[in-house]
Image (spheres, rainbow, N blue to C red):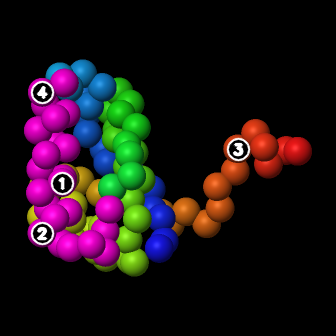
């Protein structure tokens, strides 16, 4: 299954409370259940003004549909082509 990184411009994201992040997560999971088993959320990185999410889906279009339904921005959706880490240098 292709993997994607979604960049969400969300000013103040790094200041969201635990409850606000929980609410956003619950909204996302509800929409994922509605869309079915072809899309899944792996994890997200919250920075000061953006959230970067890693999703598995057959297409960027399904990720756009998730974002629109959940009410989240999806400013950039990029398919992951390769994953590297320190072991790649060996």
- Identity of the residue furthest to the front in this view: 37
As drawn, 29 above or below 58: above
SS state under label 1? helix
SS state under label 2? helix
Label 2 to label 3: alpha-carbon separation:
34 Å
At 64% across and 55% down in the image, what residue appears? 83
Label 4 to label 3: alpha-carbon separation:
32 Å
Q: Position of residue 69 (x, y in %)?
A: 12, 64
Q: Earlier in the sequence, mark 3 or mark 1?
A: 1
For disc 1, the marked residue is 29
At 88% across and 45% down in the image, what residue appears? 90
Q: Earlier in the sequence, mark 4 or mark 3?
A: 4
For disc 4, the marked residue is 19
Residue bounds of the magenta highlight: 18-40
For disc 2, the marked residue is 34
Q: Residues within 10 Å of mark 3 (few under 14, many from 20)?
A: few
Label 2 to label 4: alpha-carbon separation:
23 Å
Q: Earlier in the sequence, mark 1 or mark 4?
A: 4
Q: Residues within 10 Å of mark 2 (few under 14, many from 20)?
A: few
Please give the label number shown on residue 13.
none
At 12% across and 50% down in the image, what residue appears? 27
Q: Position of residue 51 (x, y in %)?
A: 34, 41
Q: Earlier in the sequence, mark 1 or mark 2?
A: 1
- Quarter holding residue 13: top left
Work out whether residue 68 can be spotted: no
Label 1 to label 2: alpha-carbon separation:
9 Å
Q: Earlier in the sequence, mark 2 or mark 4?
A: 4
Check residue 76 for magenta coloring. no
Work out whether residue 12 can be spotted: yes
Asked if labels 1 and 3 touch by Cβ distance under 8 angstroms, the answer is no
Q: Position of residue 47 (x, y in %)?
A: 38, 30
As drawn, 30 above or below 8: below
């Amino acid at each position: 299954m292709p993997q994607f990184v979604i960049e969400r411009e969300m000013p103040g994201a790094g200041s969201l409370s635990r409850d606000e992040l929980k609410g956003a997560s619950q909204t996302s999971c509800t929409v994922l259940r509605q869309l079915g088993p072809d899309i899944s959320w792996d994890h997200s990185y919250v920075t000061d003004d953006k959230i970067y999410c890693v999703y598995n889906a057959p297409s960027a279009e399904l990720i756009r549909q998730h974002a629109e339904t959940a009410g989240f921005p999806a400013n950039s959706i990029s398919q992951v082509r390769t994953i590297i880490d320190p072991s790649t240098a060996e």
